[in-house]
Image: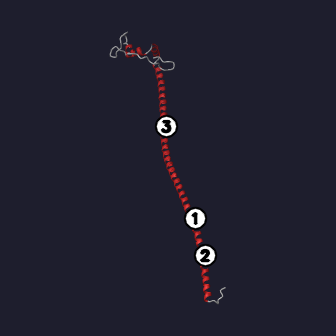
Amino acid sequence: MQSNSNGRIPDMEVLTIQDCYVVGSSKRKASLWDPNFDISSHNKSCYLFEDDVTQLKDHNKDRLCSKVESLLGQVTILVCLANEKAKERKRAEDKKAHQITNLQKEVSHFQADNFEVDRLHSESTRWAQEKVDLYNQVKQMEKVISDLNEGTTRKEVDLSKTIDALKDDVASSYVVGFKAALEQATIIHPIIDLS
């Protein structure tokens, strides 16, 4: 396998079983059940390019181990970064879930407040209607009182007139009676001077 300049491994060419051969035989197909089948030779012939084979021969174990260690270090760093991103994503999801829960609580409070506002509004409307009814009753009572006052005033005037008429009757009866008494006194005692 030959690596690119950017350090990535190129896509491998997929080989079918028809492309693989047994080592030492030029055109015989490979079989895992064949006793002459050599897996390392098979892998080299099927999966490695000539340049890769020469480069691999040039590398010693220490150099390969250091490259593997550096790649493992990169893998570890990438795994740590992936874990941190997953934790960050989880924290963000938890934060969103917490915000959703808080919003649901606020909605519940708003609904309760809205219910209370509706109740107070209906009560206020009922009180306003009661106020209008009481105002109408007061107006009716004022009219009744005004009518009663007018009736009382008329009766007072009528009574005053009746009293004046009765006083005049009493006075005229007294005057008539006094005149009649004077006439009787003059008839009975003609000598008395009644002037």
Q: What element carries label 2?
A: helix
Label 3 to label 1: alpha-carbon separation:
78 Å
Disc sitting over residue 96 in the figure: 3
Q: In this view, does 136 lie to the left or right of 18?
A: right
Q: Picture coordinates of residue 186 (x, y %)?
A: 62, 87
In this view, 159 is above or below 100: below
Residues packed near mark 1 inside 10 Å, few (<14), some (14 to 19) or many (20 plus):
few
The residue wearing badge 2 is: 168
Label 2 to label 3: alpha-carbon separation:
104 Å
Q: What residue type is labelled 1?
A: Glu
Which label's residue is closer to the chain start, 1 or 2?
1
Q: Picture coordinates of residue 34 (x, y %)?
A: 33, 15
Colouring: secondary structure
Q: Is mark 3 on a helix, strand or loop?
A: helix
Q: What residue type is labelled 2?
A: Asp
Instruction: Write the residue at 56% across / 63% down.
Output: 147
Label 1 to label 2: alpha-carbon separation:
26 Å
**Quadrant of the frame with the C terminus:** bottom right
Which label's residue is closer to the chain start, 2 or 3?
3
